[in-house]
Each structure stands twice: as C-alpha cells, then as structure tokens.
Amino acid sequence: MNNREIPESGESKKEMVNDTKRWSFCPVCGNILSDVKNLKFCIKCGINLQFLKENKYVQAKRVQNPYITPTLSPPLSKPPIKYGPKKISDEEIFNTKELKLWGTWPSIGIPLLAFVIMTIVTAAIMFIIMFFSFNFNLNLLNNLISNPYFVIFSLFIELIFILVPVLYIGQYFQNPTLKNRLELLGFTRKGFNRVGLIQEILIGLGFAIVGIVLVLGSSFLIERFLESVFNVTFSNASTETDIIFSSADILIIVLFSILMILVIGPSEEILFRGFMQKGLTRNLGNWGGILLTAFIFAIIHVLEIIISYLDSPILLLFSFIYSFIPYFLISLLLGLTYYWRNENLIAVIITHGVYNSLTIILAYFFPFLF
C-alpha cells in the first residue's frame, strides 16, 4: 500500500500541465513574466495567460487590466484648455478684423508706458549733459530745451513709440518676426502696386493740407469765441516754438521737416493708430476706439501746457481749450483716415509727417499764424 502511488485528482493534473507550460515571456506584448505559480494575467497588457494556454486563442478583453489601478476621472475627450492670446498665423495678419487682439487696458496702457519711458530717457539725457557740464541751474536747462540741435536729437527718442508696441505684440504670433509685427500694426506696403502706393501718398498729402486748414481755422474760431464771450485777449507772446525757430536757419528747418516725415510720423502713428486705435476699436467699437484714441493723443500733446499753467486755473482753462481742440481735430482726421484706408498706415503717416513739416515751415516764414 505504501509503495503504490496515490492517484492524483483531475484538477491536480491540470495544474501540473499548466505549470510545465509556464512562459518566461508574454506571447502578446513580450513582457518578462514573474516567476509565480499559476500566473493568470500579464502584468503589462493584462492578457489572460491561462485562457490562452488552454484554448490557443486570445480571450476577448471585456475587463480592464486587474493589475492597473483605474483612475477616478475619465480620459479627456477634448484637448486641454490653452491659455493666452490666440496665435496669429502668417495668412491671418491681413484678416484680423474679427479677432479681438489686445484688450482695452493694454491698448491704453502700452502707449502711456511708451510715453513715460520716452520722458524718462529724455530727462536722463538732459541730466547727463548738465552733470558733465558741472552747471546745475535753470538757465542751462532752458537753453538746452530751446536749443534746436538738442530738439532735433531728442526727436530720435520717439522711436521708443515703435519699439514698445512691437515688442508687446510678439506674443500674438505663431511666427513673431519684425516684418509680421509691423504688418499687423499697418506699417506695410504689401497689397499695393506702384499705382496704389502713389495713390496712398497723394491721399496723405491731400489730408495734410486739410489738416493745416482744419487746425488754423479751428484755432481762429476758438480765439474769436473766447475773446467775445470771456473777453480774453490772446497776445502774440513767444511760445516754445517761436523761441526755437527764431534762432533757426534754413538747415534747421530742413532737418526738422525731414525728421517729422521719417521719424515722428511713423513713430506716433504706429503707437496711436496702429496699436491703440486698432485695439480699442475691437473692444469699444469703431467710433469708440477712434474718439478715445483722438482724446488721449490730444491730452498727451497738450500736457506741457497743462503743467505750465497749474498755478493759474483760469489761464489753464483757456489755454487748454485753445490747444486741445485743434489737436483733437487733427487726431480725429488721422483716425478716420486710418479706418478708411483699411488700417493701413501709409496715407496716415504721410498726412501726419507732412502736416508737421508744413506747420514748421509756416511757423518759420509766417510766425503770426501760430
């Protein structure tokens, strides 16, 4: 009895057979299998190894891999939310009227930041000049401000008006090249052939003359109104412009005129129309953007007058009215031109630059007009 082998049950024989057929690698995914007796599932792919051994085919996968802990949240069916502005492709640069672009506050804040930076740089240069001259007094400061050559040099500082918005809008591009940034701001001749370019130049020249008539006419009417209603007399006292051009020669006038066209026109129009108005019109509507841009443009240009008459509220009020309205009207003309020309700056820059040049020439030869 002791020498006879005890017969094994059918279940024991089945386990023995399965154990002799133990695999070292998963036949489905190739993963190394653990040295565990009667291993049922592959840890990596979850295939039922025992079913495969017995039936010679892969069992349909109805359940998840038991060795993988299921996540509490279902897999994402949509891509994750992307933060930041929509990136503009090269093909969309000239078709952005439906895009919101930058918001209202950046449209106002970035130009004001550029103005503050320009003011700080100008003041720093004046401080350096006075420091190395070893002469800190108001006379030197007044002489420096009224010096035509220093004023010509300071005009180049307005290039900051181009630099600041160009740097800011880089975040809106898939391909933020300088060319793409300037094109979005409207500083481009793309889409214009030679005839179209000449047409834009002629439009700019025509509106420059309109601007001169508009400013001189409005100044005359405002002066007559203030004299008749408030009995205010406007004397021909010397202004800063008179002081600068009284000692100027033809060379100074020519240099001023050229820089107005090549530096001041492009700088201020890229900042105020290309950036500010472009952003505001998309957030406040066309008229809201045009009017607010014109208002801010005029305020910045009469800021010197506001500071000069802070000690006399009456003079401040009359001087502000006399100066603000013409600036507002010329800015309104520039804004409407920019809108009419489908946000292209060629005609607007020509209008602004030539208007400034004509103002300088007229102030030199006909000082009684200003």
Image: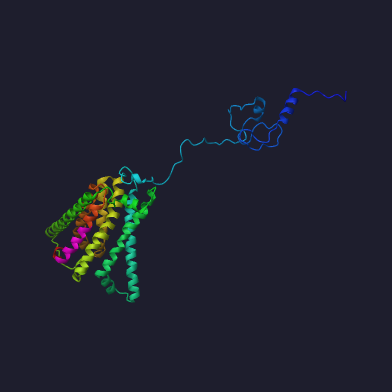
Query: Is 322 included in the stretch rendered in magenta?
Result: no
User: Which quadrant of the view contains residue 81?
Assistant: top left
The residue sitting at 14% across, 59% down in the picture is 223
Residue 46 appears at what percent x and percent y? 61, 33
Q: Is residue 13 visible?
A: yes
Count of numbered circles on the image: 0
Q: Is residue 235 visible?
A: no
Query: Which residues are drawn in magenta?
Result: 353-365
Tell me where residue 210 appears, x and y as whole percent: 16, 54
Q: Nearer the viewer, residue 194 or 351?
A: 194
Question: Is-magenta flag for residue 361?
Answer: yes
Nearest to the observer: residue 9 or residue 225: 9
Q: Nearer the viewer, residue 133 or 199?
A: 199
Figure coloring = rainbow
Looking at the image, residue 357 lies above or below residue 192: below
Q: Whole-percent x and y of residue 262? A: 26, 60
Residue 36 horizontal/vertical position (percent): 70, 35
Instruction: Spot the residue most to the front.
Output: 194
Q: Quadrant of the N terminus?
A: top right
Q: Is residue 182 above or below residue 150?
A: above
The secondary structure that dominates the magenta segment is helix
Q: Is residue 367 above or below residue 181?
A: below
Determine which quarter of the picture holds residue 16: top right
